[in-house]
Image: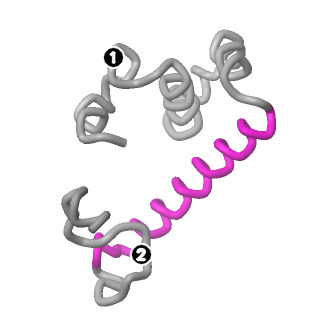
Amino acid sequence: MSEDQYSELLKFESSSKFTEREKVALSYTSAIIWNPDIADDALWAKLHRHFTIPELVELGSFIALTLGQQRWIKTLGIGHGEILADTHAGLAPAPAMPQAARHA
């Protein structure tokens, strides 16, 4: 995601920073995480226009796994960067590196 997209994430549905495919994927994510009632026939029709069934299974599985991991970490009371902070393991480094430095 770009910095512009991060700033628009909470209003992705009306944002011009996301493609229609990305908006549908984010709606699917919202249905899995927050409100399964929004996974109505209209959402499924949009999902099937943009994704194959195997892609939907993969995307849904990734969303569910990530949500589960985050809930488990929160349950353990672990803060960002507290575990493996002195290694290169993990999903993200504690300080965000500028884009240019990552590709140097």
Which residue is outermost to the top? 42
The image shows residue 25 at horizontal and vertical percentages of 55, 30
User: What's under tag 1, amino acid-wise?
Assistant: Ser
- Which one is closest to the eye, mark 1 or mark 2? 1
The image shows residue 7 at horizontal and vertical percentages of 23, 34
From the viewer's side, name the closer residue of 9 and 34. 9
What residue range appears in magenta? Answer: 53-81
> What residue is shown at x 47% (from left), y 60% (from top)?
71
Q: Which mark is residue 76?
A: 2
Above or below, 69 relative to 39: below
Quadrant for the C terminus in the image: bottom left
From the viewer's side, name the closer residue of 60 and 101. 101
Above or below, 69 relative to 11: below
- Residue of label 1: 16
Q: Main secondary structure of the magenta part?
A: helix
Above or below, 14 relative to 3: above
**Disc 1 to disc 2, C-alpha distance:** 38 Å
Quadrant for the N terminus in the image: top left
Horizontal side of 19 relative to 104 (left or right) equals right
Label whose residue precedes the other's in the sequence (1 or 2) = 1
